[in-house]
Amino acid sequence: MDCMQRYIFGIFFILAAVIGGTRGKVLVSGLVYCDQCKDGKYSHMDYPLKGVTVIVSCTDRYGRLTVSKQLKSNLYGNYSIVFDGNPDLSSCMVGVSASGQDGADVRCMATVGPPRSLKLIWQMSDISGYEVDPLYTHPAELPSFCPKASPKPAPPPKQQPTLPPPSHASPPPVKLPPAPPVKLPPTPPVKLPPRAPPVKLLPPAPPAKRPPPAPPIKRPPAPPSWNYPPITYVPYPGYIPMPKFDLPMPELPFLGPPFQGASACPHKMWLKPEYKCFWMVDPNTKAVALFDSPFMPQVYGTDVTLLQALQGGGDPYRDLLREATTALLNTYHSISFPYVDMNMESISTEMDMVLSMSSEGDVISAAQNFMRLNSGYGRVPCNFTPCK
């Protein structure tokens, strides 16, 4: 190939490597021609060979084959062999194969020229290009147009090294001379330092003297206790006194300890006469006495009984008293009443908190909470059965 062809082919090779995204390429290119006059020079009487197999072979110093690749020449006798990676081909040889020449011009395949070495002509990043001197083959006989004698015979071609046959023999073992004995100097005796003198113990410390006891602290006398004035009843706006109900209720027998299981009954169940035997307290007991709340007399008075409290309604405060009284009766009846730490004291505390807020919305919310509690949240039934 001339300089222009090598330049154009190198440009195309670099663009193909960049566009394809591959890294580390080595290009080996050259020409194969038919040396018709057997003068070893490429002239106008020679022509390029198509389909000739060209081999690139590399061996190590022991004659073992390390790299080998072959390719056929194109229509113009050119060949371009590409190696992936970045191998060092400076010590490799390129030659025409003596076999496997199917498709080549058999008229010029009588003998094969010597192999050639590679020459690095350009290198860019991790892409390298090697060039090989033209390879040639000879025909069996000289054509008639070849000169029979030349005034100055061409000098014989330089003797090129032939490709060594592949060998897999291991390299000869390396014999090293025996190492001379090493004489170490004698170890000097180790002198130990003299022993340290014995440690003299310090005399015992004298006994510590305790400080004198501290004088007693004189505390000031406690201030006199305050005598708060009595709480006067102030009815809230819109207060309606609770009516008195006098319904005959028979005496209730003692039923023993409360029910051990979980039970929640609404106020309507407690008002039915067939369930009167489940009352654990007298229905005529004053509600103020059971709740023990300082705000109960101010809101409901002191004469409301438990039976009257269960019959109340139509007002947020009366609804609250009815549902709180029902919760109190449920705690007397069932030990496992479904409320966290629900007892008489906790119900009284809840009533104190709600009545002290003086907010009708808080009263309605507390009454609804007691109502859901007395219904068992839809999970705990009422275990009332008609009394005998």
Image (cartoon, rainbow, N blue to C red):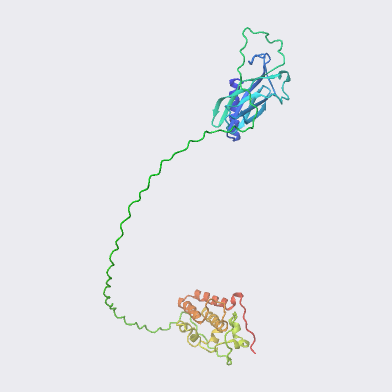
Residue at left 55%, top 28%? Answer: 123
Horizontal and vertical percent position of residue 338: 57, 77
Between 380 and 203, the one nearer to me in the picture: 203
Horizontal and vertical percent position of residue 85: 59, 34
Between 3 and 234, the one nearer to me in the picture: 3
Tell me the quarter of the picture where residue 18 sits: top right
Residue 167, above or below 231: above
Between 15 and 210, the one nearer to me in the picture: 210
Residue 110 seen in the figure: yes
Tell me the quarter of the picture where residue 231 sits: bottom left
Horizontal and vertical percent position of residue 372: 57, 76
Residue 312 seen in the figure: no
Horizontal and vertical percent position of residue 124: 54, 29
- The N terminus: image quadrant: top right
Residue at left 28%, top 66%? Answer: 203
In the image, 255: left or right of 303?
right
Q: Give the mark count.
A: 0
Residue 360, above or below 127: below
Tell me the quarter of the picture where residue 229 sits: bottom left
- The C terminus: image quadrant: bottom right
Between 297 and 377, the one nearer to me in the picture: 377
